[in-house]
Image (cartoon, rainbow, N blue to C red):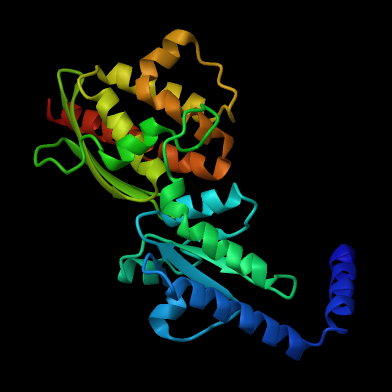
Amino acid sequence: MIAQAIGLGVAIDYVQPIGMEAIEAHEHALTVRALEGCSAWTGCASSARRSGTIAGPRISFTVEGVHPHDVAQLLDERGIAVRAGHHCARPVCVRYGIPATTRASFGVYTSPAEVDCVDRRSRRGAEDVSPMTSPETLYQDIILDHFKHPQHRGLAERFDAEVHHVNPTCGDEVTLRIRLADGTVEDVSWEGAGCSISQASTSVMSGLVVGKPVSNALELERLFLSLMQSRGESTLTDGEAEALEDAVAFEGVSKYPARVKCALLGWMAMKSAVAEATAAVGSTS
């Protein structure tokens, strides 16, 4: 506790000359500035804009057409620190149909220019989620194509098992149904909500495993897990990478630990569904 006590003392020494009233006024002005910036364009919606109240020196907002996690990632890549998720308010997000929000917090050290930078960069969010070709980047054209045109989306009426997986860290979720026949994955169907990474990865997975023997589908899951755990330094052989097809486009995602769970969500759901379906088929045979 010694370090914490020393840190507290330094913080007090820092704020006392400024004065708490001056700090409160500064933070309130920054928050109003941020809300005015958000209100100035139709693509932005903030919690304070909905309620008409300012709860503190922060705003939680969404950008039309771009998932909050993607907004946060894009801002982070430009040196702007924000948070994305439910912020301990998942019931409220579920109640109002909000997948998550991006939250910007302000302090005595924040300048008006920095607030304007958040607004300016957020406005470009939808434009910035655009095709990139380097394997090092997070948003490649293959990923964005699967996000915009998902495969096997829409729950099928015939299925052997259904699972529902949620990433509690960020709120991404997927409901997945699977049908097996003679040891083969005959069909995969799904519905979900979340960032472009989780939705695109589920699309890629479903396209890969349908028509494959169950053992092959599980091997593909193992290879993809290995890719996601590589932190951008994959050790997959050429043959293994070829077997993953479009899924190798997610190699860049493995460099961002916070996004790995997004990419794995659909794959883990498929693995669980296979286990349940196999058990169900075995119990009825």
Residue in front for this viewpoint, 122 or 264:
122
Residue 169 visible? The answer is no
Residue in front for this viewpoint, 25 or 273:
25
- The part of the image, by quadrant, that contains residue 271 is top left
Position of residue 264 measured from the top left corner of the image (x, y, whole percent): 42, 37
What residue is rendered at 57% in x and 77% in y? Answer: 33
What residue is rendered at 47% in x and 71% in y? Answer: 38
Quadrant the C terminus occupies: top left
What residue is rendered at 51% in x and 66% in y? Answer: 87
Does residue 73 lie above or below 183 as drawn? below
Position of residue 119 measured from the top left corner of the image (x, y, whole percent): 53, 65
Relative to 79, 134 lies left or right: left
Quadrant the N terminus occupies: bottom right
What residue is rendered at 35% in x and 64% in y? Answer: 98
Residue 195 visible? The answer is yes
Position of residue 180 measured from the top left corner of the image (x, y, whole percent): 17, 26
Q: Furthest-bottom residue in view?
A: 21
Relative to 114, 68 lies left or right: left
Tally of numbered discs: 0
Residue in front for this viewpoint, 189 or 80:
80
Relative to 118, 241 lies left or right: left
Does residue 106 lie above or below 77 as drawn? below
Does residue 226 lie above or below 254 as drawn? above
- The part of the image, by quadrant, that contains residue 82 is bottom right
Does residue 90 lie above or below 23 as drawn? above
